[in-house]
């Protein structure tokens, strides 16, 4: 064995480009652009927009926790619920859960999804407040 032959050393810099010297030089979209948001984040934004729209008319909704869950827990109902209102209990604030996957399955476009999310939020707020959905949002059912 000849000890004078140097062993190949690993490349000190990791390779970030393809073999032609091209490749992504940066992110495709900045983080604040909706393109970089996943479906769950976009859905949460739809719920938040709907809640903010209702809070202007019903300031007491600021004390209600709105949560987005993927699917409802085991139900005994024949149909899958799209949302659920839970009244306040000892030390627990009132809570409204909106179920993402059932709503996504029932809507094809983003506009349909936004409309359905708003209708579900209005219905759950109405149930929580003991009012009709039309009194919670006068435009309910008109879109």
Image (spheres, helix red, strand yellow):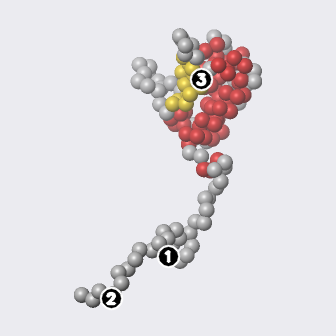
Secondary element under disc 2, as helix, strand or loop, is: loop
Tag 1 near tag 3, CB within 8 Å? no
Residue at mark 2: 4
Q: Residue at x 50, y 24 (%)?
A: 81
Q: Residue at x 53, y 70 (%)?
A: 17
- Name the quarter where the N terminus is drawn: bottom left
Q: Residue at x 67, y 20 (%)?
A: 61
Residue at mark 3: 65
Q: Nearer the N terminus, badge 1 or badge 2?
A: 2
Q: CA distance from mark 2 to mark 3?
A: 72 Å
Residue at mark 1: 19
Is residue 105 in view from this perspective?
Answer: yes
Question: In x, y percent, where is residue 45?
Answer: 63, 37
Q: CA distance from mark 1 to mark 3?
A: 52 Å
Q: Nearer the viewer, mark 2 or mark 3?
A: 2
Q: Is residue 115 above or below residue 123?
A: below
> In the rendered image, which quarter is residue 73 located in?
top left
Secondary element under disc 1, as helix, strand or loop, is: loop
> In the rendered image, which quarter is residue 111 located in?
top right
Q: Nearer the N terminus, badge 1 or badge 3?
A: 1
Q: Nearer the viewer, mark 1 or mark 2?
A: 2
Q: Is residue 12 above or below residue 90?
A: below
Question: In x, y percent, where is residue 101?
Answer: 50, 35
**Residue 53 or 17: which is nearer the viewer?**
17
Q: Residue at x 50, y 76 (%)?
A: 19
Q: Is residue 36 above or below residue 70?
A: below
Tag 1 near tag 2, CB within 8 Å? no
């Amino acid at each position: 064995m000849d000890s004078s032959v140097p062993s190949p050393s690993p490349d000190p810099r990791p390779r970030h480009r393809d073999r032609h010297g091209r490749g992504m030089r940066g992110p495709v979209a900045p983080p604040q652009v909706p393109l970089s948001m996943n479906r769950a984040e976009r859905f949460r934004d739809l719920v938040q927009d709907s809640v903010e729209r209702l809070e202007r008319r019903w300031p007491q909704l600021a004390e209600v926790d709105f949560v987005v869950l993927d699917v409802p827990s085991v139900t005994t109902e024949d149909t899958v619920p799209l949302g659920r209102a839970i009244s306040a209990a000892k030390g627990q604030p009132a809570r409204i859960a909106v179920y993402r996957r059932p709503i996504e399955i029932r809507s094809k476009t983003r506009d349909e999804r936004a409309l359905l999310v708003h209708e579900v939020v209005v219905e759950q707020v109405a149930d929580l407040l003991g009012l009709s959905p039309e009194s919670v949002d006068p435009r309910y059912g008109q879109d």
